[in-house]
Amino acid sequence: MKILVAVKRVVDHTVRIRVRADETGVDTANVRFSMNPFCKHAVEAAVALAEAGHSSEIVVVSIGPRQATDVILTGLAMGAHRGLLVEAPETLETLAIARLLAAIVAEEAPDLVLLGKQAVDDDSNHVGQMLAGLLDWPQACFASAIARTEEGLEVTRERDFGQDTVALALPAVVTADLRLNTPRNTALPMVMKARQKPLETRPAESYGLDLAPRLTIEKVTAPPERAAGQRVADADALAAIIVRERAELELN
Amino acid sequence: MAILVVADHDRGMLAPSTARVVSAAAALGAPVDVLVAGEGAEIVARAAASLNGIARVRLADAAALRAQPAETLTPLLLRLAGDYTHIVLSAGAVGRDVAPRLAAKLGLMPVTDIIAILGPDRFERPIYAGNAIQTVHAPQPFQVLTVRASAFRPAGSAATSASVEPLEPEGLPALVRQLSEARTEGDRPDLATARIVVAGGISVGSAEGFKMIEALARALGAAVGATRAAVDAGYAPNDWQVGQTGKIVAPDLYIGIGISGALQHLAGIQGARRIIAINTDPEAPLMKLADYALVGDLFEIVPLLTARIEATQG
Ligand SMILES: Cc1cc2nc3c(=O)[nH]c(=O)nc-3n(C[C@H](O)[C@H](O)[C@H](O)COP(=O)(O)OP(=O)(O)OC[C@H]3O[C@@H](n4cnc5c(N)ncnc54)[C@H](O)[C@@H]3O)c2cc1C
């Protein structure tokens, strides 16, 4: 099968971000960017399927600024075959991303689209579900295991009560959770090889879609600070505090 | 016009989140209906009908809705959308699955993980693992929303129950077949809405060790949580994970045991009123954030705490 993997360039998950003083957003000047962790799990899942003989072509696509080439290269270094950068402003909403991906799916005709379940910047958790909706495809979100079957796929999903396993026919959309796999590290030779792989760049406008924003972000603020705490001497003192706190709860 | 809340339920029980989503929806300023979609969900519908502040319950009972799949719920909600201005779900597994799919079908942006409702089209939602809060204005003709149940107080029960009106959910597509479920069985309260949460980290060391955490939770009537590291190690089930990618909790009291306090974990406990931390390392971020911090070995402290608390119940 042919697999399309969508990946996003985000502020690295280890960076402690700062809200801009003018409340217009988060300060992203001079911070490290990398591939969204969940997208790495999606790429790893695609490469694992190819290594198991279930896929012969993996296309990795990113929609974003020119610098997003870096995360496509990461995907190529991990084992994807071909890259596509759709150049667009970072501020595109998830609906616009899903519409662009639907147009790319129409051109590329993959059997499976793999994405991360959410991006660690806006924490939206939208795009996979939106894309599946636009395509009228089945979706298996928050996947922690994927198996290829004759019928299509069997996917284990993380649910509020634990996990379940669902069967779905292809074509389908699957979004990756963190327990799906352990993404491989990319050694320098793989990164060098990735530079030789085909990487096409296209402007988002060339798809002729309505990408206009629906929402306005009025402001972005820091969460309220918590009051300073205190050190407790020993377990007995802590037990007394817990008993007191709980008694207060019962009154309220 | 009116607002439609989609009820959360599981195995014939209305989830505690629904009462909170109903109270959030009431803040949108229009009458609230509740949709119960499932198989054999009559009892759930009656439980929903007793919530305060709702106009009516609509019951969609069909075999295809048993596991509440997004591919089946979305067309059902599209049929009902004409009667409403907002469709509101909780930001749990079902809501996260359905809301974006539904919004895309309507050509709209969903607004998800809402923690405050400022008006019918103005909301607050966290980004960057809760390290920033966005105020979003959504001037759309229709809104598809998910709310974090833990951020809202539950609606009480009504003096007289609302009516339950059955729908005829025929001809709904079923694209995904559920093969099996692996459930975490236990007697602890619902994590996402619990008033007290006792959570353990990787240093609890084993599934056995989590029995000790559970014993403290039981003594307190608390729910049990875990870090991603503890879940990944197989010490705790995945549905106990608290954080950016797990459950979001907002208890009155959160007790974090052997947890460093990585920003992805802290994302899940920002709404906690009081935080207690137990850790050998006084410099751990959770220790610095906590209202009460005790430096020490969890294996010595936790059994002592459990014994002391059990002794006070008399
Ligand atoms: C994209 C992404 C999403 C993530 N999402 C989540 C999430 O949703 N939830 C989550 O929890 N994590 C999440 N993580 C992981 C997170 O970054 C941390 O790795 C994790 O929370 C650490 O778990 P921990 O505190 O159990 O372990 P550690 O960070 O290893 O901390 C263990 C702590 O135990 C203390 N300790 C050791 N021995 C003892 C003892 N005997 N008694 C008392 N204390 C002791 C240590 O001092 C230390 O502070 C995510 C990470 C990524 C990259």
Image (cartoon, rainbow, N blue to C red):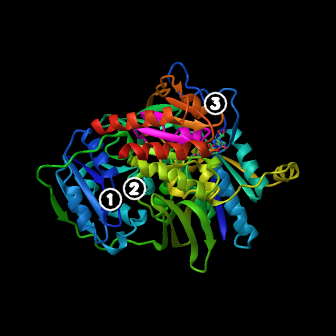
Tag shown at residue A204? none
The image quarter containing residue B47 is bottom left
First in sequence, mark 1 or 2: give its number.
Answer: 1
Instruction: Give the image location of residue B186, x and y in percent.
Output: 44, 61
Q: Amino acid at mark 3?
A: Pro
Tag 2 secondary structure? helix
- Residue A21 at what x, y percent from top left? 54, 19
Q: CA distance from mark 1 to mark 2?
A: 7 Å
Residue beneath disc 2 = B102
Label 3's element? Answer: loop
Q: Which residues are magenta?
A: B250-275
Badge 3 crowding class, 10 Å Cα cut-off, few under 14, some 14 to 19, many 20 or more, is: some
Give the structural element (helix, strand or loop) at label 1.
Answer: helix
Ranked by sequence position, the earlier of labels 3 and 2 is: 2
Residue A231, placed above or below residue B120: above
Residue type for callout 1: Leu
Depth check, front residue: A92 or B209: B209
Determine contact: label 3, label 2, CB under 8 Å.
no
* Residue tagged 1: B78
Which one is closest to the eye, mark 3 or mark 1? 3
